[in-house]
Amino acid sequence: MTATLQLFATCAKGLEPLLFDELQQLGLDTVQQTVAGCRFSADLQGAYRVCLWSRLASRVLLQLGQCEVGRDLQRVTAAIAQTPWQKHFDVEQTFVVSFTGQNQQIRHTQFGAQLVKDGVVDHFRDAGLGRPSVDRNDPNVRIHAHLHREQLTWYYDLSGEALHRRGYRLEQGAAPVRETLAAAIALRAGVNGATDVLMDPFCGSGTLLLEAAMIVLDHAPGLRRQQWGFDAWLLHDAEVWQQLVDEAQQRFATAQASSALQLIGSDNDARLVAIADQNAARLGLTERCQWQCLDATKVTPPELEEGQQPLLLCNPPYGERLGEEVETLLLYRRFGAQLRQHFQQWQVAILAGDESLLKRLKLRSHKRYKLYNGALDVILALYDLHKEQVEFTQEQSSDLANRLKKNYQKLEKWAAKEGVSAWRLYDADLPEYNAAVDVYNEHLVIQEYAAPKDVPEAVAKERLWYLLDTLAETLPFDAANMHLKVRQKQAGKQQYQRKELREITSVVHEYGVQFKVNLSDYLDTGLFLDHRWARRELGKLSAGKSVLNLFAYTCSASVHAALAGARDVTSVDLSKTYLKWGEDNFRLNGIPLRPHAFVQADCLQWLQQQRPQQRYDVIFLDPPTFSNSKRMLDVLDVQRDHVQLLKLAARLLKDDGVILFSNNKRKFKLDEEGLHEAYLRAEDWTQRSISTDFSRHKGIHHLFKVTLADG
């Protein structure tokens, strides 16, 4: 077949320029770059060459026809039926149609595929050849159709399965890099026939190293594939194809004989290292490979011979894209330090999922490329470690490490003696490191506060990363058990938004009481640590009494009251989730749910609806500083509304009863005159309620004992 064919090579988004260059290097001189691929013209041998040798294309499609899509869609089916399909496959072979694109007439890809399928079937029927069958799972023939605005183009797929399926990777890890992306990374990193040392300390199943090795060793990426889309094509020329395969095998053998390439791969997952070794064996590269199970932050380079040009390329874990996965951030920090210390003569290429991750390396890149790993935006950064890599952030003092050590040594002993396993370690003790750090058993929860307006965002972030680094280096907590939460208000839908549930939980102890805390999924953990004294005091007041807990949250105060022998405890909160959590806390402590009550309601409305005859001995009132929940009837401001709130609660208080009123508004001021007019009196218990671990910031909360004044 000597005719000039019109073809389209598809590729992943971001690879179009590389594919354009590759097609030209394959001897094609009529290449046109477009979105998600390149158009080109070639004879049959040229089409086969792209199938066999393209490292970047996803598919090679042979154009068979085009038509304008008007309002009469029957004309579309008729145009497709005019394509001489019987020249390309016979009625005994199965086929499938895939369709991309849409417009006003064709709004669904399934409908578009049906139109094309009908046209194919009509052609065979009109020719009196019968009807070919559709097979969606394992068809002999794949037909692709693409709609761009008003123009529909249809193709015969010469590839069959997507071209990234090279035939050597039968198993892979949980987050693999597709072979075409791996090849693009290697090409951008400068891999060529002269490369002699390749290393990947996050090798997984070996894809990056093996794709790079195939470039160095002139190994055609399609050489190991057993099936092609053109196998069932009636115009397939097996002799032309076999000549290309023979040529590719010879080129590989020649390069194998002359190349000194070494491949060094490591990963902390021994199962993946074994898979990488198997994949290398399928490519005939076993003798060139060194595989080992090793932490990437401990990897060191091999001894190099003079003149060798080593390249390290890798795809470390991304973690959560917004940078809240502390373990990943610290991994990048330590990996960067390892590169700076041990890989001074190396070129390095790192694919990262987020700019903040690359910043943790503390290395200066000389080139960056935007790529896509599936649907994820990723960045490929290139580093030349021949050049001096100076730490480009200001040297930090040792004050923070000293403060953390001092606090930990003092408070760990205090907490053990006190009988609490959840406590505050650090609370912006040094103003420039503006965060709180809490211990929950073997976990740390780091809560970042919003930086002052006069502190640039980049500076604030750098200080936060330094705090994380110092915590990991100074204290005996694993990075995997460090959880970062950002308390600053964000815009739009991001405001205080909870991310995908991870369910990292722990059970903590407090004065003989147990609580379930969630360390990963919410802004708060389910336990306000600064209120532990007030909870214990509530317990002391509750024996044999009827207790009401308003704004109960996860009912931690209710648990203290019930365990201390309260006759009954009523917990009221707007959140069904928190009340269920509270029931779990009751069960955790072996407390029967009856006769206690868990009421889902707006506390303000609930108080207004209660009859004064319903009286309680003790009321625990801990409202939020401010709340405008959509499910609340009124907007609550604790400074403005606390007198009215206390008056409503006092309606339900027995004559000799007690209200424990607490809030966390930093500059709260009790309206004593308003309380006097409401026949209430308050005793300030704030100072006695501040535990040792919160004594550095005495304004953390306010606590008052409120009783009825003599009428």
Image: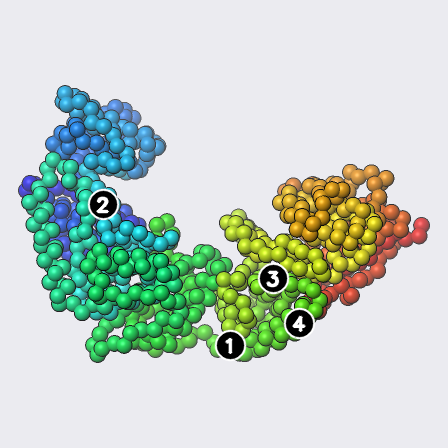
Query: Looking at the rendering, in which quadrant would you find the N terminus?
Result: top left
Amino acid of disc 2: Arg
Left or right side of 424 for 82:
left
| Inter-mark Cα distance, 2 to 3 | 52 Å
| Inter-mark Cα distance, 2 to 4 | 65 Å
Question: Which marked residue is nearer to the observer: mark 3 or mark 1?
Answer: 3
Left or right side of 1 for 131:
right
Q: Mark 1 points at which residue?
A: 396
The crowd level at tag 2 (other Cα within 10 Å; few <14, some 14-19, many 20+) is many
Amino acid of disc 3: Tyr
Asked which secondary structure carries label 3, the reply is: strand
| Inter-mark Cα distance, 3 to 1 | 28 Å
Residue at image x 64%, y 43%? 576
Q: Mark 2 points at which residue?
A: 59
Of pointers 3 and 1, the one earlier in the residue sequence: 1
Of pointers 2 and 3, the one earlier in the residue sequence: 2
Q: Mark 4 points at which residue?
A: 413
The circle drawn on residue 440 is 3
Quarter occupied by residue 239: top left
Left or right side of 621 for 683:
right
Left or right side of 544 for 229:
left
Find residue 103 and report its horizontal and vertical position in percent: 33, 34
Task: Choose between 394 and 304: the one closer to the eye.
Answer: 304
Amino acid of disc 1: Gln
